[in-house]
Image (cartoon, helix red, strand yellow):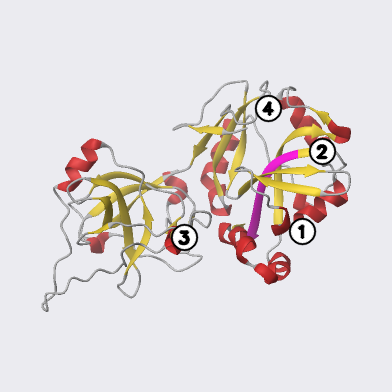
Amino acid sequence: MLAAPVDAVLEDPNLVYEPKWDGWRALAFRGDSDVYLQSRAGRNLTSYFPDITRAVRAFVPPGVVLDGELVVWEGGRTNFAQLQRRVTAGQGLLRVAREHPAYYVTFDLLVDAGGEAVLDAPLVERRSRLVRLLAGAPPQLAVTPQSTDVAEVSEWLTRWTAAGVEGVVIKRLDSRYEPGRRGWAKFRVRATTEAIIGGVTGSIRNPETVLIGRFDRRGRLRYTGRTHPLATPQRLELATLLSPPRPTDRRLVTHPWPEPLPAAWSGQFDRPEPLPYVQVEPTVVADIEVDTAFEHHRWRHRVRYARPRPDLSVYDVPLLLGEGEDPFPDYASSA
């Protein structure tokens, strides 16, 4: 079952809220003697998570099907990059799993012990069964928090983001589980900040998306992410501000990023393709809306372009900080 994005936390007596974790969605099928982990896209994840399959086999009764999120904790917060390492670790997988163990944060029950399907049962009953089923389970098989208290949800959105909570998932207590349907809602925490425009897809006169960056402490403009497609008014306004890179004294055009953009820079391990784009003179500052998924100096999800900031110099944009440093010191208050 999927969730549709919303721009505000909905309120209703029949709604319940759960943290939205920054991990990989996965179903866990407990067979008679084996365990199968399946990604949201239908990919077989079983071999990448021997620690989770071992925990499920040891504690979950045969016939059970669970829904949840695979996460890895590091330094007090979730680390998405460590999930991706599972896929690329090769012969070092067991070492990676030992050094960075995964956790399966469960939030729904599709089939109960003995093979009893409960998809048509209301969420409140499925949740009750799930809690009973996993009572006394090891920490690797946790049940996600759930609340009907909007004040508590506000606490999650302002304090838990530092631990890797991206927002909240909103569900109806009386809802059945409908595979493939967007019957839930999800609200993602966002903040507004500034970045420097270093390139666009499309053309300078008709930009489709924007490639953004920030200076690091050594004065290098580093690529930090890409926006969603621009609206027509945004394209028209931005086209009047952008210009090609200026040639140097030797009439050479230089730009801090390669073209096309290397596939590894996108962070999309499942679609590793270089991105053709048009380089621009990095002098235009823009307001962008971003979420909490910031790692390896980049926003993993696409950001939202808000507006140009002609009143700001590129040196007014916050510096790109080192790994582990908070890119938004006032993030909690802005959420």
Amino acid bearing label 3:
Asp
Magenta highlight range? 66-73
Which callout, 4 or 2, points at the residue further toward the start of the chain?
Answer: 2
Point out the tag, 2 or 3, that comes first from the N-terminus.
2
Q: Position of residue 17 (x, y in %)?
A: 61, 33
Q: Is residue 291 visible?
A: yes
| Sequence order check, earlier mark of 2 and 1 | 1
Q: In this rendered view, identify the residue nearer to me: 289 or 150.
A: 289
Asked whether residue 71 is drawn in magenta, I would say: yes
**Residue wearing tag 4:** 177
**Which secondary structure type mostly characterizes the magenta part of the structure?**
strand
Q: Nearer the viewer, residue 19 or 208?
A: 208
Name the quadrant of the N terminus. top right
**Residue to which mark 1 is pinned:** 51
Image quadrant holding the C terminus, namely: top left
Check whether the beta carbons of the residues at disc 2 and disc 1 lie within 8 A of each other: no
Outermost residue on the bottom side: it is: 250
Considering only vertical position in the picture, is 329 above or below 6? below
Q: Is residue 37 left or right of residue 79?
A: right
* Numbered mark located on residue 326 in the image: 3
Type of amino acid under label 1? Asp
**Where residue 273 sits: x, y (%)?**
43, 58
Determine which quarter of the picture holds residue 114. top right
Find the distance from the CA under tag 3 to the CA under tag 4: 37 Å
From this view, report whether residue 33 is shown above or below residue 257: above
The residue indicated by pointer 2 is 64
